[in-house]
Image (cartoon, rainbow, N blue to C red):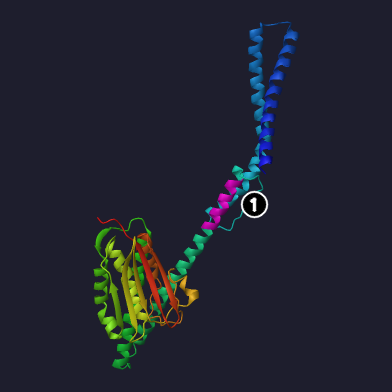
Amino acid sequence: MRIRRVSRKLAGVIGFQIVISGCFSAAFFATSLLYDSISMYPSAFMRQLINAWVGFFLFVFAMFFIGRLMHPKRLAAFQPMVEAIRRMAKGDFNVALNIHVEENHPIGELAKSINDMAVELRELERMRQEFISNVSHEIQSPLTSISGFARALQNDELSPPERNHYLSIIEKESFRLSKLSENLLKLTSLESDHHPFERKSYRLDKQLRDIVLSYEPQWMEKEIEMDVSLEKVNLVADEDLLSQVWINLLNNAIKFTPDKGTIGIHLQQCEDEVVVRISDTGIGIAEIDQKHIFERFYKADKSRNRINSGSGLGLSIVKKIVDMHKGSICVQSELEKGSVFTVSLPMKKQL
């Protein structure tokens, strides 16, 4: 292929030289015939000058003529690309250009870039439609419950316990709808370039201890044993954002751990990074679901009670915040044996 490219370039150079030589040779013979026909013979200098000008104009004319001949071929190569761009502009991303040119040819590179752009736009469109579908589904469910139980409350024959039960469900569904809206706004803000991100030095172990104590009523109600081991660690990070990470992970651990289970929270500093492990003896996560749990709206247990489950955005928010801190998060889990979420954050120079 490389030999072919060199041969093509060499042929182009030779062709160019032939065109130039032909034009100036034609100029020489044409002017000589002209001098003989009019019996006028200028000086050698003037003859050279006239030959040069005539040869130049013949060369320009030849290149113009060759360009006109090549124009339809160039247009034929660009036409499919123009049509593909027009289709993408109208929202049709199912385009695939198949233009046969030599390797590393500019037209081939342009066609490949258009194909790559179509693939990316097609994937973005799929994600957009999936996101709208998920949001609509998550919103429709609580609205249906609220509407249904509101109609049921219009029955004057309901007993006070039944009425209170229906009102309790409406309250829970309203809270879930509000939480969904809040998480959507939070995730959208995190993914924008305008979300506040303020690093400061603070005690990570103290932050974790305060969060565990703030959730004491929840884990005490389920008689959960808390296994807490926190090294003294000063971390430079956004304290408010990381607080949301620990709250989400601890809240999930409490939610999916059965009564009298165990939750572990361990913090240690390993050379140039901080590692936080939050473990539980809960229902666990199937191996097939573990690689998807940080995706928006993904719920590992599809049969879980909708009122007790979340919106599927909590772990997406966690992953985004950890990524903003250039850290990593992973999960190890086994069904009916619990889960371990490990968050690793790089140590920054103290402010």
State which quarter of the image contains the N terminus: top right
Give the image location of residue 301, x and y in percent: 45, 79
**To which quarter of the image does residue 153 belong?**
bottom left
Q: Quadrant of residue 190?
A: bottom left
Is 91 positioned to the left or the right of 278 in the image?
right
- The residue depicted at 64 percent of the width and 40 percent of the height is 74
The answer to which of 311 and 104 lies nearer the viewer is: 104
Asked which secondary structure carries label 1, the reply is loop
Density class for disc 1 (Cα within 10 Å; few <14, some 14-19, many ≥20) is: few
Above or below for 275 versus 217 = above
Q: Is residue 297 left or right of residue 122?
A: left
89 or 3, which is in the foreground? 3
Q: Is residue 111 magenta?
A: yes
Q: Amino acid at mark 1?
A: Asn
Nearer to the camera, 148 or 125: 125
Q: Is residue 209 left or right of residue 340?
A: left
Q: Residue furthest front?
A: 271
Please indicate, yes or no, whether residue 241 appears anywhere in the rendered image.
yes
Tell which of 37 and 198 is nearer to you.
198
**In the image, residue 224 lies in the stretch drawn in magenta:** no
Pinpoint residue 13: horizontal percent, then vertical percent.
66, 30
Give the vertical position of 96 relative to 128 (above or below): above
Q: Residue 121: image x %, image y %?
A: 51, 57
Left or right of residue 172, residue 35 in this image: right
Expressed as whole percent of the image width and height from the top left, the position of residue 230 reads: 28, 71
Q: Quadrant of the C terminus?
A: bottom left
Q: Residue at x 41, y 77 (%)?
A: 141
User: Mark 1 — residue?
Assistant: 98
**83 versus 298 height, above or below:** above
Q: Which residues are magenta?
A: 108-120
Q: Main secondary structure of the magenta part?
A: helix
